[in-house]
């Protein structure tokens, strides 16, 4: 890893995550970076490119959630500082990868780099996924009682993570396959899911 590139990312890019919601702060970006580097090594991809893609993948959240993947790619491509280390062709590949990371995307990633950041972004720790889903429901319905938040959260979890859900694993990393099955087992066990959501709500 180029030390100057790493210094730039650490000092100028990652601090931007601190203004985002609880599920997308700096610790999230750093976790995606570490998993992306591991997957890049496993699949023979350029680690520096994977590192930058992961660092930029959610920067578009400063604008909105719905188009954040597109905005993030625009931010990466417009960053003139990156041209010290990458060619225009590399930057275009990196932009495409950032655009392709979103879980609700209907098409598969266009390159191995998109598959890497998408897979790394699927941090399927069951309790964390459930807590983040409840937190986002609370953001959508700030005056909602537990039943309102639980109903919305369960619907989302079923739609996204259950068998047949829209989330896809493009590289089927061992970590994600195992964690997804654990999460699906909880979703199928409605009393257990409800208890975990109640625990989150009680600790608000």
Image (cartoon, grey):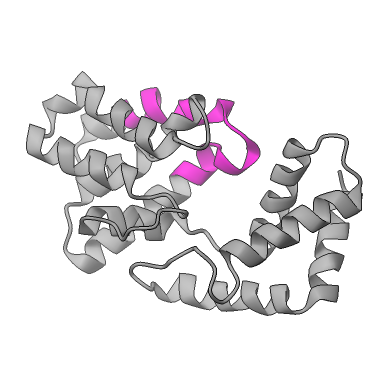
Span shown in magenta: 7-29
For this view, does 179 lie left or right of residue 151? left
* Residue 182 position (above or below residue 27): below
For this view, does 2 lie left or right of residue 165? left
Q: Position of residue 38 (x, y in %)?
A: 32, 61
On the image, which quarter does residue 36 sit in? bottom left
Q: Position of residue 25 (x, y in %)?
A: 55, 37
**Front-most of 101 and 200?**
101
Q: Position of residue 166 (x, y in %)?
A: 50, 64
Q: Is residue 26 magenta?
A: yes
Residue at image coords 55%, 40%: 24
**Front-most of 15 and 102?**
102
* Residue 43 position (above or below residue 18): below
Q: Main secondary structure of the magenta part?
A: helix
**Front-most of 123 and 64?**
64
On the image, which quarter does residue 55 sit in? top left
Q: Is residue 87 visible?
A: no
Q: Is residue 25 magenta?
A: yes
Residue at image coords 77%, 79%: 189
Residue at image coords 35%, 67%: 170
Q: How many marks?
A: 0
On the image, which quarter does residue 40 sit in? bottom left
The outermost residue toward the top is 80
Q: Position of residue 153 (x, y in %)?
A: 73, 56
* Residue 123 position (above or below residue 190): above
Residue at image coords 47%, 25%: 16
For this view, does 160 lie left or right of residue 35? right
For this view, does 188 lie left or right of residue 64? right
Quadrant of image for the N terminus: top left
Q: Is residue 80 visible?
A: yes
């Amino acid at each position: 890893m180029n030390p100057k590139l790493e210094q730039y990312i650490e000092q100028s890019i990652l601090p931007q995550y601190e203004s985002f919601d609880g599920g997308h702060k700096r610790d999230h970006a750093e976790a995606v970076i570490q998993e992306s580097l591991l997957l890049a090594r496993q699949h023979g991809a350029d680690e520096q490119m994977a590192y930058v893609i992961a660092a930029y993948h959610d920067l578009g959240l400063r604008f909105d959630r719905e188009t954040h993947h597109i905005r993030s790619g625009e931010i990466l491509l417009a960053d003139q500082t990156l041209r010290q280390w990458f060619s225009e062709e590399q930057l275009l590949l990196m932009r495409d990868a950032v655009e392709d990371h979103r879980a609700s995307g209907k098409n598969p990633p266009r390159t191995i780099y998109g598959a890497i950041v998408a897979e790394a972004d699927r941090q399927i720790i069951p309790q964390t996924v459930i807590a983040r889903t409840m937190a986002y429901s609370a953001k959508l319905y700030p005056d909602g009682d537990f039943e309102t938040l639980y109903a919305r959260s369960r619907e989302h979890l079923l739609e996204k993570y259950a068998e047949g859900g829209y989330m896809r694993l493009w590289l089927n990393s061992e970590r994600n396959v195992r964690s997804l099955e654990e999460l699906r087992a909880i979703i199928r066990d409605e009393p257990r899911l409800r208890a975990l959501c109640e625990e989150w709500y009680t600790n608000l």
